[in-house]
Amino acid sequence: MTSSPERAHTHADILSTVEKVILEVAGDELFLTGPITMATSFNADLELESIEFVALAEKLQLHYGSKVDFVGWISTKELDQIISLTVGELVEFIASCRL
C-alpha cells in the first residue's frame, strides 16, 4: 500500500505530464487563461476541439504505453460526462492504470 504523500507526488507528476501534453496539442496560449489544475475542464476551460482530444489521446498513449487506453476509457462515458470531464478525472484514470 502506498502512503498519501507518495500518491500525491504521483498525481502531481501525472498532472505535470498531462499539462505538457495539453500544451503541445492546444498551444501555449492556454497559459493566458491560467494554470491547468485538477479542476480544469476540457470543455469549458480549455475548449479543446475533438481533433485536439484525439491528439491528446495519441500523445498520452505514446507517453504511458498501452496501459493507458484513453480512447477505451472515454468511450465508456456518456456525452454529458465527456462534456464535463476535468483534468483531475484524467489524472485519476492514468494513476489507476499505472498501479
Image: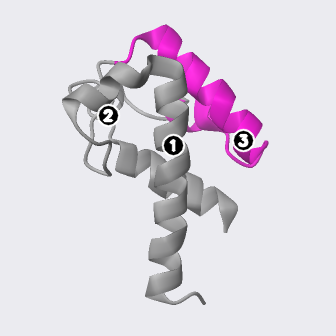
Mark 2 or 3, nearer chain start:
3
Image marks 2 and 1: residues in contact by CB distance under 8 Å: no
Question: Does 17 sit above or below residue 80?
Answer: below
Q: Mark 1 points at which residue?
A: 18
Q: Closer to the N terminus: mark 3 or mark 1?
A: 1
| Left or right: 41 in relation to 90 | left
Q: Name the residue under label 3.
A: 63
Q: Position of residue 24 (x, y in %)?
A: 54, 25
Residue beneath disc 2: 81
Which amino acid is tagged 2?
Answer: Gln
Task: Give the residue type at disc 3.
Answer: His
Marks 2,3: beta carbons within 8 A:
no
**Residue 42 tag number:** none
Query: Mark 2: few, some, or many residues within 10 Å (few <14, many ≥20)?
Result: few
Q: Does the magenta stretch include residue 62?
A: yes
The magenta region covers 48-74
